[in-house]
Each structure stands twice: as structure tokens, then as C-alpha cells.
Amino acid sequence: MEILEKAPAKLNLSLDALFRHLDGDPEWKMVMTAIDLADYVYLDTNDQTNEIIVQTNTGFLPQDRRNLAYQAARTLQKKFNINAGVTITIEKKIPVSAGMGGGSADAGAVLRGLNKLWNLNLSLQELAEIGLEIDSDVPFCVYSCPALVEGKGEKITPIGSLNSLWFVVAKPQASVSTPSILKQIDFCEIQHLDVQKVVDAIHNQDWNLLFQSMGNSLEPITTQKYPEITNIKEKMVKFGAQVAQMSGTGPTVFGITQTESRAQHIYNSLRGFCKEVYLVRPFNLTNR
Ligand code: ATP
């Protein structure tokens, strides 16, 4: 039996790292949203063998146990003694190593999909806890809705809708290694943010407050090495974005507007400077 799970990318509207746990993982306080730039993950379960096969439409992604989608299937198989295999086919649309959580999105989609195919009856919260064993962004990707994200990434609190906003997303050429940026965080030095203000702004649909309160504490670390990020941010604002910032550990930059026409203008203007530009809407999996 084959099913298709959509695996939406994520953007960080607010990202703060509070301290480092003894095991080295950061304590996060973030507001994230899913967007409708998504990979398509096809799952074909097989009762004859317990082999996990991963195939993608890219030449460069790992198709073995290094793939986060593989790890998601393997984790479920082991935890619940599943005697079935699965072929996972990933149609990749989310730029890789971009700060949009593409690998985690695929893993989240595998968890949701196999929960159905293997009749595990796990709640989203239970899937999110399993997801944390794979990567810190997987719990959010299991939910894929606007949410406050805390802890090492496992505490997900869905918040209100962003449906009246438009997003322009631009991915500069650089590929950023997330672990190398995380290693460089100096928790006393980085500028901490009032993440709760962003939560309140979304709750009250107060977009001016949202635009004033957003931020990414890791942006100065990444932009030091990749100044083109600042350049694209400035262009986004010049072309009409009400706010623009880096997502995750970068290098992706996104801008927000309240009208489609303004977003379309930014999109058209940026395409002359940046090869990968997308005009997208927020996505809420829990509303489907
Ligand atoms: P994050 O913001 O969560 O750190 P990212 O968007 O910066 O993620 P990804 O696109 O998830 O980065 O890729 C990061 C690394 O993960 C790449 O080196 C890639 O080889 C590896 N990877 C493993 N599985 C996948 C997958 N299914 N899709 C994309 N990358 C994957």
C-alpha cells in the first residue's frame, strides 16, 4: 500500500538559544511556521522483508542510514518491533542545507505516514518525542503548524494562524553547516530576544508587533562568514518587505508582506539577484 505525505519546509520567525545543556545541545526558544514549499514523500510498505529503501530525485543526498527519512523509519521499526519494510521515495523541492529543515521535514513526514501505514495510533506529541531522537527540528516538522518551540526542540505549542501573510524566500548560493554554526554560539554574547512578544503578536494577529519583535540570535554568526545574507535582506526590505531575516542557521532569508501584490513585486525584483527565490504561503498541517 502506498501513501503520499507532504513534507513542508520551516522558517524561524524568532530564534533564540538560551544556554547549552551538559550534553552540548542548545536550549531553544523559537517561533516557527511551516510553508507550502514542500518535499513529497511516498511511502510503500512491504510485508515480505524489513528492508528500508530510500530513493530521491537528487544525485547528492545520502540514500542510506545517513538520510533522516531512513532514520525515522528505522526508529519506528525498532521501537515497535515492526516486521515490515518500506520504500521511501523523496521528491526533493526544499533546498538542502538552507536552514529550512528539509531533512527534518522528510523525517517528520515518514513518522506521520508510517504511523498510519503500520497502524501505530500514536499522537502527534508521541511522534514528536520520537522525532527528537532523529534531529531537533523533527518534532516541529511532525506538527508543521505555527508553533512555539522550546526545550531541545521537543516542546511544541501550536499558536494562531499566519494565513493573511505572504512570504518571499531567497536561498543564497552558500551551503551552511548547522553543527559548525551551533558550535560557535557564545550564550553570553549573542543578543537574546523576547520570543513571547512574537507569540502574543500572532495570537492577537498584531502584524506590526510581529514585524518589530521578530529576530534570529544566530544571524550575526552566519552573516560574518556569508555577507551576501545581509545584502539579500537589505534588498528584500528595499523592494517592500515589512520585515526580512535569516531562517535557522542560514543562509536562507525570508521577507514578509501583508499583500500578495507586494510579495509578487519583491519576488520579481529579487530574481535578478538570486537564482533560488520562492513566493509562498504559510502552511498548517493540523488544519487539513
Ligand atoms: P536545519 O535547519 O534543520 O539544520 P537544513 O535545512 O539546514 O536543516 P537539510 O536540508 O535538512 O539542512 O540538510 C542538512 C544535511 O542533512 C545535509 O548535509 C544532508 O546531506 C543531510 N540529510 C539527510 N537526510 C536528508 C534529507 N532527507 N533531505 C535533506 N538533507 C538530508
Image (cartoon, grey):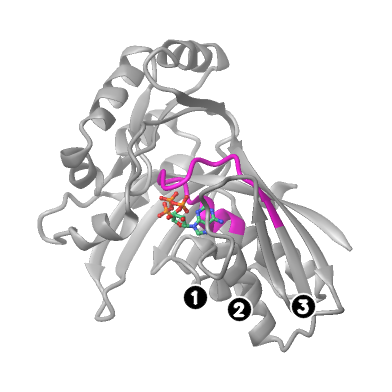
Q: Which residue is mark 3?
A: 120
Instruction: Please tell me the numbered disc located at residue 133.
Output: 1
Instruction: Please tell me the numbered disc located at residue 75.
Output: 2
Residue 48 drawn above or below residue 271: below
Choose the circle earlier in sequence order: 1 or 3.
Answer: 3
Marks 2/1 in contact by CB < 8 Å: the verdict is yes
Q: Amino acid at mark 2?
A: Thr
Q: Residue at x 75, y 84 (%)?
A: 82
- Crowdedness near tag 3: few (<14), some (14–19) or many (≥20) residues, C-alpha within 10 Å: few
Q: CA distance from mark 2 to mark 1?
A: 8 Å
Please indicate whether residue 151 sits to the left or right of residue 106 in the image.
left
Q: CA distance from mark 1 to mark 3?
A: 18 Å
- Crowdedness near tag 1: few (<14), some (14–19) or many (≥20) residues, C-alpha within 10 Å: some
Would you identify the image quadrant in which residue 43 lies?
bottom right
Q: What element does badge 2 sit on?
A: helix
Residue 241: percent from left, percent from top:
39, 20
The residue nearer to you, when weighing 241 against 112, is 112
Q: Amino acid at mark 3?
A: Leu
Please identify, in this view, whether the residue under mark 2 or under mark 3 is nearer the observer: 2
For the N terminus, which image quadrant? bottom right
Please indicate whether residue 147 sits to the left or right of residue 190 in the image.
right
